Amino acid sequence: MESNTISTLYKQADLIRKMCIECIATFGVGHIGGSSSIIEFLTALYFKMANIDPNDPKNPDRDRIVLSKGHAAPGLYATLAARGYFDKKLLLTLNQNGTQLPSHADMLKVSGVDFTAGSLGQGISAAVGMAINAIMDRRKYHTFAIVGDGESQEGQVWEALMLAGSRHLHNFTVVIDNNKMQIDGMTADVCKVEPFESKLRAFRFKTYTIDGHDMEAIVDTIEKCKRSRMPTAIILNTIKGKGLKCCEGHYKSHSVNFTPEMFAAECTGGVLK
């Protein structure tokens, strides 16, 4: 991987993170923590590794990307806008009356969203179904399901993983955002779900654990997953609230009041207005 390519992706991730935070600041409250922790992964996926086309968002051969941790929708919205799925200024309507951008990603309202996130655990179940469908229809698309570590406390997540492993879904990758925090505190204190690696291997997954903010590691690992002949898992060790001094490493950044004044203090210049 050429260093200038990785450098470009880092710059794009910085821009997307700022867009995400700015749209939350415009509304005044939102899920900064879990949105910002997956920005590097979303950037690598949408700007380099995924087979997608903003000009043909419903192409049946596109890769499927399911944000199962649906509360991180602002991060996904900012990525989609930056990639050209819709006008960036639409981000300023996040969560407002009549918006096309509700709190959780909605496939009926937002171009580029492959599944409407509902209760935690539902997204990964749908994603496994998409991977099965690709095999049945003899299509070559790959399906990615992005799951939170707190979300992984849901039994439905492990039922979906069990099915993916038993069906040997080589075209399926689960991505766990292991920022080690959830809405009520440290994930390990609420209900410990680690060790992820040994559990996923027991479910017949080829498993990779990487720094979730290391762009080169992310790109290289996605590439390995797309070449795999068995289901794959990427465990992203991330920082909740990444990029904001007031939010980094604080579980209360899961959903937090964040004003335009706070944005101005943390970020140099807006990019949406």
Image (spheres, rainbow, N blue to C red):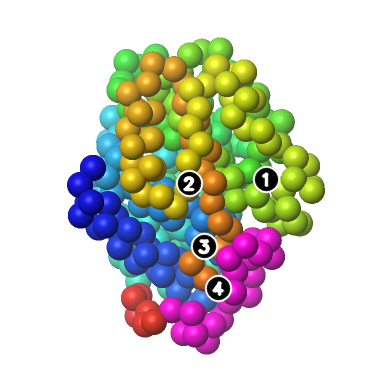
Q: Earlier in the sequence, mark 3 or mark 1?
A: 1
Q: At 54% across and 82% down in the image, what residue appears? A: 262
What is the CA distance from the residue labelled 3 to the residue labelled 2?
13 Å
Residue beneath disc 4 = 245
Looking at the rendered structure, the kind of residue marked 4 is: Lys
Instruction: Give the residue at mark 1.
Output: 150
Gap between marks 3 and 1, in whole Å?
A: 17 Å
Kind of residue at badge 2 = Asp
What is the CA distance from the residue labelled 1 to the residue labelled 4?
23 Å
Callout 1–callout 4 Cβ contact below 8 Å: no
The quarter holding residue 160 reads top right
Within-10-Å neighbours for mark 4: few <14, some 14–19, many 20+: few
**SS under mark 4:** loop
User: Residue 172 occupies which quadrant of the picture?
Assistant: top left
Going from N to C along the chain, the mark reached first, 1 or 4, is 1
Pointer 4 or 2: first along the chain: 2
Tell me the crowding category of disc 2: few under 14, some 14 to 19, or many 20 or more residues within 10 angstroms, Cα based: some
- The numbered dot on residue 242 is 3
* Mark sitting earlier along the chain (3/2): 2
Q: Nearer the viewer, mark 3 or mark 1?
A: 3
- Amino acid carrying label 1: it is Gly
SS of the residue at dot 2? strand
Give the residue drawn at x 58%, y 58%: 240
**What's the mark number on residue 27?**
none
Q: With 54 as the anchor, is 130 left or right in this view?
A: right
Image marks 3 and 2: residues in contact by CB distance under 8 Å: no
In the image, the segment drawn in magenta is: 245-267
- The reply to whether discs 4 and 3 touch (Cβ–Cβ < 8 Å) is no
Q: Could you tell me residue 50's position as x and y percent? A: 31, 39
* Amino acid at dot 3: Lys
The reply to whether dot 2 and dot 1 touch (C-beta < 8 Å) is no
- Tell me the residue that label 2 is attached to: 211
